[in-house]
Image (cartoon, rainbow, N blue to C red):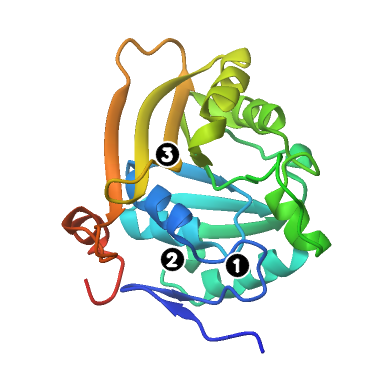
């Protein structure tokens, strides 16, 4: 039986059992890591249950448009947005991002994109479309969309598996986006990193800001770094 209970954060709760992209560490770390400004108008590509728009709204952005191709995910994100204190600044759109034609450009674009383009696909078509970028949204396509919808001084932030970083950076470079910030994520102390948060902007960046983040210690408990990083969001930290 599917667990249909909401996931509770300090300042909002959200349902995620119907969405292709559930609440998970990748998105949570990305939402906490990306820097925002009070007047930022944000686009979330592949919003799933709407976690990133809610986190960024808590951090103080002006407005977030959330796009997802999956109908059930957008329905659930809409429920979550309407139940939040930021309902008036959150909008959800059910469509292919390639067909999204807003009447403005964005200060910040975020995405927890499809990962598994080189791995075995799951059986369920919805999850497969959400997870496999060769079905609906290649890295090249994602970068092209970001370049089309980003303001000249805008930022594009996303989380990726570490082993596709170079491939993605090449795709970004082809549309004029260069790396500005990088957070390398290590799941367990003394293990190899497996994820990376990247932030891009237009034009050449002379000095990339680089940090390393460790989630769990050798005893499998959360590190002090992790607890301090997420104390404004997680209950019990």
Residue 79 place in picture, x, y as percent: 59, 75
Foreground label between 1 and 2 = 1
Q: Residue at x 32, y 20 (%)?
A: 208
Helix, strand or loop at label 1? It is: helix
Q: Is residue 141 above or below residue 87?
A: above
Q: Residue at x 56, y 15 (%)?
A: 173
Residue 21 place in picture, x, y as percent: 61, 61
Q: Nearer the viewer, residue 113 or 175?
A: 113
Helix, strand or loop at label 2? It is: loop
Read off the residue under disc 1. Answer: 77
The answer to which of marks 3 and 1 sits earlier in the sequence is 1
Q: Report if the CB atoms under discs 3 and 2 are less than 8 Å apart.
A: no
Read off the residue under disc 3. Answer: 197
| Residue ranking furthest to the bottom | 1
Q: CA distance from mark 3 to mark 1?
A: 23 Å
The answer to which of marks 1 and 2 sits earlier in the sequence is 1
In the rendered image, which quarter is residue 169 located in?
A: top right
The label number, if any, that marks residue 24 in the structure image:
none
Q: Nearer the viewer, residue 40 or 231?
A: 231
Read off the residue under disc 2. Answer: 86
Q: Is residue 133 left or right of residue 230?
A: right
Q: Report if the CB atoms under discs 1 and 2 are less than 8 Å apart.
A: no
The answer to which of marks 3 and 2 sits earlier in the sequence is 2
Residue 223 place in picture, x, y as percent: 21, 58
Q: Residue at x 80, y 65 (%)?
A: 124
Query: Badge 2, how many Cα within 10 Å: few under 14, some, many 20+?
Result: some
Q: Residue at x 35, y 37 (%)?
A: 183
Query: Badge 1, how many Cα within 10 Å: few under 14, some, many 20+?
Result: many
Residue 198 place in picture, x, y as percent: 44, 33
Q: CA distance from mark 1 to mark 2?
A: 13 Å
In the rendered image, which quarter is residue 94 located in?
A: bottom right
Helix, strand or loop at label 3? It is: strand
């Amino acid at each position: 039986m599917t667990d249909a209970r909401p996931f509770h954060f300090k300042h909002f709760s959200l349902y995620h059992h119907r969405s292709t992209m559930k609440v998970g560490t990748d998105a949570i770390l990305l939402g906490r890591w990306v820097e925002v400004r009070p007047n930022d108008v944000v686009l979330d590509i592949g919003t799933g249950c709407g976690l990133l728009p809610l986190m960024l709204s808590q951090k103080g952005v002006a407005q977030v448009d959330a796009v997802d191709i999956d109908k059930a995910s957008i329905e659930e994100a809409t429920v979550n947005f309407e139940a939040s204190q930021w309902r008036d600044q959150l909008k959800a759109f059910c469509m292919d991002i390639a067909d999204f034609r807003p009447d403005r450009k964005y200060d910040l674009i975020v995405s927890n994109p499809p990962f598994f383009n080189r791995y075995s696909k799951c059986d369920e078509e919805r999850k497969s479309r959400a997870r496999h970028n060769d079905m609906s949204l290649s890295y090249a396509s994602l970068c092209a969309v970001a370049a089309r919808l980003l303001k000249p001084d805008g930022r594009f932030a996303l989380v990726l598996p570490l082993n596709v970083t170079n491939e993605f950076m090449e795709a970004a470079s082809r549309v004029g986006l260069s790396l500005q910030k990088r957070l390398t994520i290590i799941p367990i102390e003394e293990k190899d990193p497996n994820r990376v948060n990247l932030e891009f902007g237009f034009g050449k960046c002379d000095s990339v800001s680089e940090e390393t983040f460790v989630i769990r210690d050798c005893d499998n408990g959360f590190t002090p770094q992790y607890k301090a990083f997420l104390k404004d969001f997680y209950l019990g930290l």
